[in-house]
Amino acid sequence: MLRKIKNGLVVSCQALEDEPLFGAEIMRRMADAAARGGASGIRANGTADLTAIKEYIDLPVIGLIKREYPDSPVYITPTFSEVEALVQSGADMIALDATKRVRPDSVSLSSFMKKIISAFPEQKWMADCATVEECVEAEQLGFHCVGTTLYGYTDETSGKKLYDNDFQFLKEVLKAVRLPVIAEGNILTPEMAARALQIGAHSVVAGGAITRPQQITARFVEEIRK
């Protein structure tokens, strides 16, 4: 999986239920378009989308399930049930929240990783992190790669962008860990993606800039109104 996406672009093909492109049929076609454009991999949310995409195109897929629980802010593959569903659906790698935030039922990330690694020893794991410390801990806990996915999306990092100060956060993560580092989060242009790889990222994930036309439109409209 990691070898196949090295120095390449992973396209996040996701749409939530309240978005106009929601649905496995649409997402598999979105993934097909990404594949035809040269993507090295796909990041997909939910077992329906993941299964449809893997049946339709021959690219590795990073799977996750976004699900909210009342007792936790963690929503990217938060519990064992989501992990189990993704394994059964054939995810090549599973992404999950690896922040220090409290998980559902107050389960620690350490105990969670021990449980899922024991249950699925052949599965590959991606840590979605928000701080350098979280990336370091993820390396210690047995993840196969770390992503900058949640930088700017936690209370501790709110308002920050991955591209700030010429990708300073990415540079700090690369110095702190030996694992492959996947640059993800607010990669809005081809130039940003190329710069992240130049700095040393293993691969780059882009989503909203490619697969969410309402977000793309909103950026155009915002700039025009200025």
Image (cartoon, grey):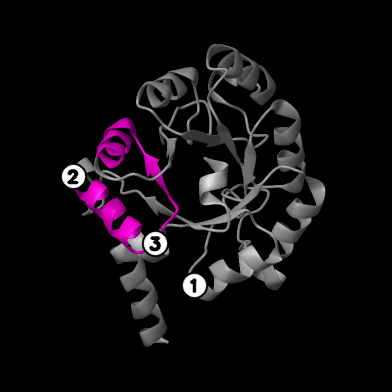
The residue at 37%/40% (across/down) is 45
Residue 38 counted in the magenta span = yes
User: Disc 1 marks which residue?
Assistant: 190
Report the quarter where the C terminus lies: bottom left
Mark 2 and mark 3: span between their CA atoms?
A: 20 Å
Residue at 56 percent across and 18 percent down: it is 116
Separation of residues labelled 3 and 1 (CA atoms): 13 Å
Dot 2 or dot 1: first in sequence order is: 2
Relative to 163, does residue 183 appear above or below in the rendering?
Answer: above
The main secondary structure of the magenta stretch is helix
Residue furthest right in the image: 175
Which residue is drawn at the image coordinates 70% and 65% (left, top)?
199
For marks 2 and 3, the one nearer the N-term is: 2
Q: Name the residue under label 3.
A: 38
Q: Residue furthest left?
A: 25
* Eye-nearest disc, 2 or 3: 3
Is 83 drawn above or below residue 37 in the view shown? above
Which amino acid type is marked by label 2? Glu
Left or right position of 54 against 147: left
Crowding at dot 2, Cα within 10 Å, few <14 / some 14-19 / many 20+, comes out as: some
**Residue position marked by numbered label 2 in the rendering:** 25
The secondary structure type at the circle numbered 3 is loop
Q: Nearer the viewer, residue 130 or 11?
A: 11
Q: Do the residues bearing badges 2 and 3 touch, measured as CB atoms within 8 Å?
A: no
Task: Pinpoint residue 190: horizontal percent, then vertical percent.
Answer: 49, 72
Mark positioned earlier in the residue sequence (3 or 1): 3
Q: Give the range drawn in magenta.
A: 26-55
Q: How crowded is mark 1: few (under 14 residues within 10 Å), some or many (20 or more)?
A: few
